[in-house]
């Protein structure tokens, strides 16, 4: 049974029935791309009658322990690879290095395909099966494509992934190993996305792209990350949650998750949310810092070492609303800062993440130095993807093995 009551436009407030075949507000969308994003609204009274802290704690750690907060009616259609339930690691070594008392890492790299995108696709593919889909398609520059391919394989349906030409080859390999057919589009991520829309309309494929502008439900899996943080901190909210951002859909989802638990009385306070982007691909940061609406930031060609965050426009007011409502902040960090943070997290805490994920550590340092985050506050940094996905970047930073003869005397020389 699904507790979804309606789909609400985040711009005008108009509500649609969950049964309506709409993915965007019919009125607001006429203003242009990014307007009229829809968000599922649940019957929280009924959820509250069924759930409390004790019932949730009694369930085994997983994303689907929060099934009442997710938009699936037929549980037999759930496609799971045991995603979610990821560790929240207290980082004492890194805390000492940075100069902050309570720092935690929400380690999403241990999800089945080694990224947080699995939270989205277990829900998206399950809904696709409910809708009777047998062929799905998505645009992705990396992690989303890998996750889409894996969950499609588990569901036994065909998957097409359209990537921009700059997509990382190692992530494409992961997609194809899961059985997806990959098309490399000579153009931007937006160009590839528009082609997916046209292809889905012509061939009747189910569009599973993780963009809220195309799929109101795609953010619902991501919000479970917030639920887990609350439980793992003993039913408390941290002072700050810092997340890497491309389109910002997951940022809004995390904020929604905290608000839902707060509304039900599961937690007392709410965190402030910080978004981090790479310099050269920081449209959300520009909008936030300059006090602009999302559509006032002109589209540009992005360039950053954080490949998973390579975006040149803001797609809707969803992430900006999050920053404003949470009294949050947004920062952009350089390639140099990102690589230093990647190395630091690995050497101090044994957590190897891709550059896009390391932006949260680099962003934390900036926010502390700017006096925005206090050193006594509790901070959770979300790391979204494994460093094993982008090994070529790490290879350039790593020392080469020291070759020696198999003898103690040779070892002593190099020591």
Image (cartoon, rainbow, N blue to C red):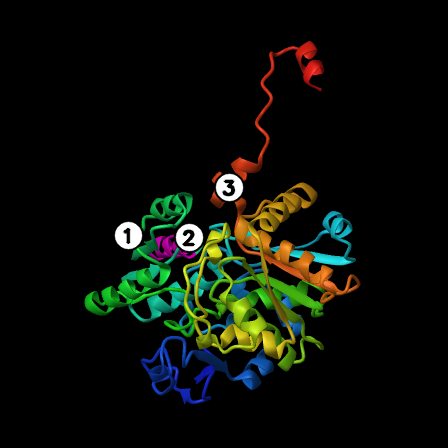
Question: 149 or 355: nearer the eye?
Answer: 355
Separation of disc 2 and disc 3 at Cα?
A: 15 Å
- Marks 2,3: beta carbons within 8 A: no
Find numbered disc 2 in the image and state the secondary structure of the residue it sits on.
loop
Image location of residue 130, percent across then percent down: 34, 70
Taking the image as drawn, is residue 68 in sight?
no
Tag in front: 2 or 3: 3
Separation of disc 2 and disc 1 at Cα?
A: 12 Å
Q: Residues within 10 Å of mark 2 (few under 14, many from 20)?
A: many
Range of the magenta residues?
144-156
Residue 142's mark? 2
The question of residue 150 being in magenta is answered with: yes
Question: 230 or 403: nearer the eye?
Answer: 403
Q: Residues within 10 Å of mark 3 (few under 14, many from 20)?
A: some
- In the rendered structure, which disc, 2 or 1, sits on the residue that comes first in sequence? 2
Above/below status of 358 relative to 393: below
Image location of residue 150, percent across then percent down: 39, 52
Question: 58 or 400: nearer the eye?
Answer: 400
Which residue corresponds to the image point at 36% horizontal and 60% vertical from the top-left? 189
Which residue corresponds to the image point at 52% horizontal and 77% vertical from the top-left? 292
Above/below status of 161 relative to 203: above
Image location of residue 348, percent across then percent down: 70, 44
Residue 393's mark? 3
Asked whether, in this view, residue 130 is left or right of residue 407, the answer is left
- Marks 1,3: beta carbons within 8 A: no
Q: Which residue is mark 1?
A: 183
Quadrant location of the N terminus?
Answer: bottom left
The question of residue 326 being in magenta is answered with: no
Find numbered disc 1 in the image and state the secondary structure of the residue it sits on.
strand
Taking the image as drawn, is residue 104 in sight?
yes
């Amino acid at each position: 049974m699904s507790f979804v009551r309606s789909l609400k436009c985040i711009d005008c407030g108009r509500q649609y029935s969950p049964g309506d075949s709409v993915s965007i507000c019919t009125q607001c969308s006429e203003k242009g791309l990014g307007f009229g994003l829809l968000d599922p609204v649940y019957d929280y009274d009924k959820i509250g009658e069924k759930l409390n802290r004790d019932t949730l704690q009694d369930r085994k750690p997983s994303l689907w322990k929060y099934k009442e907060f997710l938009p699936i009616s037929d549980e037999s259609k759930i496609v799971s690879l045991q995603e979610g339930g990821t560790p929240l690691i207290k980082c004492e070594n890194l805390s000492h290095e940075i100069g902050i008392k309570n720092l935690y890492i929400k380690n999403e790299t241990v999800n089945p395909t080694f990224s947080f995108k699995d939270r989205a696709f277990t829900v998206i593919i399950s809904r696709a099966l409910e809708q009777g889909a047998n062929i799905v398609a998505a645009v992705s520059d990396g992690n989303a494509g890998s996750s889409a391919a894996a969950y499609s394989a588990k569901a036994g349906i065909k998957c097409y992934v359209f990537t921009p030409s700059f997509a990382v080859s190692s992530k494409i390999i992961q997609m194809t190993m899961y059985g997806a057919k990959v098309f490399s589009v000579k153009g931007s991520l937006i160009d590839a996305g528009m082609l997916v829309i046209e292809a889905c309309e012509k061939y009747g494929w189910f569009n599973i792209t993780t963009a809220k502008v195309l799929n109101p439900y795609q953010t619902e899996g991501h919000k479970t990350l917030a639920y887990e943080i609350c439980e793992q901190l003993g039913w408390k909210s941290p002072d700050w949650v810092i997340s890497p951002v491309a389109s910002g859909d997951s940022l809004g989802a995390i904020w929604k998750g905290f608000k839902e638990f707060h509304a039900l009385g599961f937690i007392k306070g709410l965190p402030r949310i910080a978004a981090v982007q790479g310099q050269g691909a920081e449209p959300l940061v520009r909008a936030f810092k300059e006090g602009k609406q999302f559509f006032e930031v002109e589209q540009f060609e992005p360039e950053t070492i954080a490949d998973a965050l390579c975006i040149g426009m803001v797609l809707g007011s969803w992430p900006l609303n999050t920053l404003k409502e949470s009294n949050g902040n947004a920062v952009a960090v350089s390639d140099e800062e990102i690589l230093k943070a990647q190395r630091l997290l690995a050497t101090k805490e044994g957590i190897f993440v891709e550059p896009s994920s390391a932006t949260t550590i680099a962003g934390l340092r900036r926010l502390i130095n700017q006096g925005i985050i206090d050193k006594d506050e509790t901070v959770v940094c979300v790391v979204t993807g494994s460093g094993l996905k982008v090994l070529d970047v790490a290879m350039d930073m790593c020392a080469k093995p020291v070759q020696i003869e198999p003898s103690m005397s040779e070892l002593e020389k190099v020591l």
